[in-house]
Amino acid sequence: MLNYIVWDVNPEIFNIGSFSVRWYGLLFALGFLIGQRIILHIFRKEGLPEDWVDSLTLYMVLATVIGARVGHYIFYEYPMFFANPWRWFKDMLLPPYAGLASHGAAIGIFTGLYLFARAKKIHFFWITDRIVITVALAGCFIRLGNLMNSEIVGKATSVPWAFIFVNNTEFSPVPRHPSQLYEAISCFILCIVLYLIWRRYKTNLPQGLTTGIFMVVVFTLRFVYEFYKENQVTFEDQMTYNLGQLLSVPAVLFGLVGIFWAIRRHETNIFLNSAPQSVRQNESK
């Protein structure tokens, strides 16, 4: 008889009265904190003002959370909108914030980065090429958070590394694919690869290239991994391809177009025009 991994982890680290610290929240925050340090390192190496990192972090946190939350309700909870629009808006805006969609987060991140690039008068794909390094790392931490929550579980399987998710009440406690780990490991490897590409080429990197690579790899793997995961909502049970897979197709196409555009255009300038005086002074230090 195979010895499967019995996953019986408490999602709470500790609690004081009604206040609790959960693994998911800690890992979510760590993704941003470590990502901030990576971006600070990149800005220092490329001569950009370090104080930009704080505002960029704020853009990223708000864009990620808002995009993921709104995306979840638009993509996965739209039946509720037609049945009860008021409840749909209320549940989306008020805690507890139980649903987050990665495709919505991607849209939110790109929107936030567009606003940041416009405010700083830099090329949009210059900043996205650097941010995708940290987004890949954050994706790793978030999927580890899903694992600690025993959520987004895989389908039943007999592979020797299968997990039995004791604390998941949505599906039967049988051996299942640890789909959260599949995605976490993939995101971590992608983060390392993207960072090494940046370290090798830095400002000579064609803008849009690593963004395109990120989109193609992440969402191609997302399409594949969905075959090993249980559907998140019941209406997907009647679909040949679930919603996560359908939403991944345009994301992959966007990435392929981005790679082609980057290679053909080969834009490497950071700023839309000449660098501001404050930045030139920073570069001369």
Image (tube, rainbow, N blue to C red):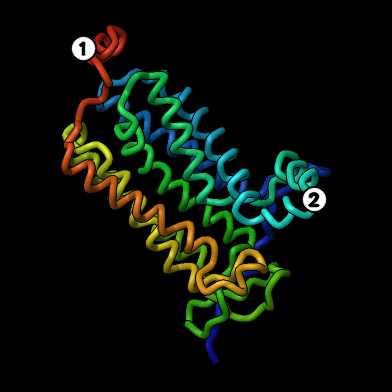
SS class, disc 2: loop
Position of residue 83 relative to residue 200, above or below, is: below
Rendered location of residue 41, percent (x, y): 33, 30
Three-letter code, disc 2: Asn
Q: Which residue occupies 71% across, 69% down? A: 170
Q: Judge the density around disc 1: few (<14), some (14-19), many (≥20) Cα neighbours within 10 Å.
A: few
The N terminus lies in which quarter of the figure? bottom right
Position of residue 267 relative to residue 276, above or below, is: below
Rendered location of residue 147, percent (x, y): 57, 61
Q: In the displayed image of the protein, which residue is found farthest to the right?
A: 17
Rendered location of residue 277, percent (x, y): 28, 7
In front: 84, or 237?
Answer: 84
Residue 178 lies left or right of residue 204; in this view the side is right
The C terminus lies in which quarter of the figure? top left
Three-letter code, disc 1: Ser
Report the mark closest to the observer, 1 or 2: 2
Residue position for label 1: 284
Residue 251 lies left or right of residue 73; in this view the side is left
Q: Which residue occupies 16% across, 34% down? A: 204
- Work out how far the residue at label 1 is from the one at label 2, CA to CA, in angstroms: 59 Å
Sequence-first disc among 1 and 2? 2
- Which disc is residue 18 wearing? none
Position of residue 231 relative to residue 277, above or below, is: below
Q: Which residue occupies 59% across, 68% down? A: 153
Q: Is residue 14 visible?
A: yes
Residue 29: name its quadrant. Answer: top right
SS class, disc 1: loop
Residue position for label 2: 84
Q: Is residue 20 visible?
A: no
Rendered location of residue 185, percent (x, y): 41, 60
